Image (tube, grey):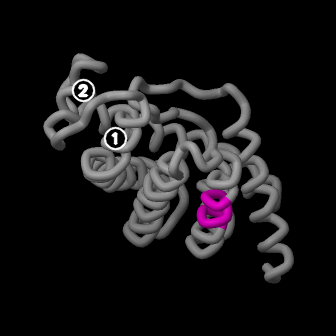
């Protein structure tokens, strides 16, 4: 694929991501995470054109999310979406190296690896970065990291790690299992 086609196709997929960000097709967690379709076009871009295209799309999508989120959010959402989606791309890439072909096994391994990578990374980033800032923006007094855990556990009535990991695992499933049937159909129609 030529660079011009890559840029054009990536632009379309990023525009679709932004449309999904603006549409009210999302479920919001108490601490600010959305389970949504925003990263699905980026995962589709990866599945069609590979890691470099997916990563380029991810960077472009993140810049666009910074622009539409505005300065009041301090960029928390776009930064977290970048690292969460990157985790899924890495899971897909490792799975591809293990299985060497697109299929059910590839998708299941990608889901498991992407979920593990994403969950660990999101627990750490939420504990050290996103939640202290976000909870302060909501008016909570945060004097230590244990306050972050306490507040999230009070909000969700679940252990902190589970409150973060469960919606991120669900989002990984949405990202992979919504994008893959579309890509499979496109690949079949190409023949």
Query: What is the magenta range?
Result: 57-63
Query: Residue 100's spot in the image, x, y percent?
Result: 47, 69
Horizontal side of 19 relative to 26 (left or right) equals: right
Q: Which residue is mark 2?
A: 151
Q: Quadrant of the image for the C terminus?
A: bottom right
Residue 68 seen in the figure: yes
Tell me which corner region of the image, top left, top right, bottom left or bottom right, holds residue 46.
bottom right
User: In the image, what residue occupies the spot 49% across and 55% down?
Assistant: 79
Q: Which residue is mark 1?
A: 131
Secondary element under disc 2, as helix, strand or loop, is helix
User: In the image, what residue occupies the spot 58% across and 69% down?
Assistant: 55
* Residue 54 sits above or below residue 155 on the image: below
Horizontal side of 189 relative to 125 (left or right) equals: right
User: In the image, what residue occupies the spot 73% across and 57% down?
Assistant: 187
* Residue 33 sits above or below residue 82 on the image: above
Q: Is residue 36 magenta?
A: no
Q: Which mark is residue 170?
A: none
Horizontal side of 83 relative to 70 (left or right) equals: left
Residue at the outermost bottom position: 2
Mark 1 / mark 2, whichever is N-terminal? 1
């Amino acid at each position: 694929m030529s660079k011009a086609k890559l840029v054009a196709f990536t632009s379309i997929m990023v525009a679709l991501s932004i449309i999904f960000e603006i549409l009210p097709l999302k479920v919001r967690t108490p601490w600010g995470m959305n389970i949504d379709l925003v990263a699905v076009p980026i995962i589709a871009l990866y599945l069609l054109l590979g890691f470099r295209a997916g990563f380029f799309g991810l960077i472009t999508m993140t810049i666009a999310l910074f622009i539409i989120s505005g300065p009041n959010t301090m960029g928390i959402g776009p930064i977290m979406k970048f690292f969460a989606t990157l985790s899924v791309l890495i899971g897909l890439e490792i799975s591809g190296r293990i299985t060497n072909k697109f299929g059910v096994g590839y998708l299941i391994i990608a889901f498991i690896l992407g979920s593990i990578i994403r969950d660990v990374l999101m627990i750490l980033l939420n504990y050290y970065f996103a939640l202290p800032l976000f909870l302060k923006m909501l008016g909570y007094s945060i004097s230590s990291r244990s306050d972050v855990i306490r507040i999230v556990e009070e909000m969700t009535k679940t252990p902190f790690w589970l409150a973060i990991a469960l919606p991120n695992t669900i989002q990984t499933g949405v990202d992979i299992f919504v994008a893959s049937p579309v890509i499979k159909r496109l690949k079949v129609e190409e023949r």
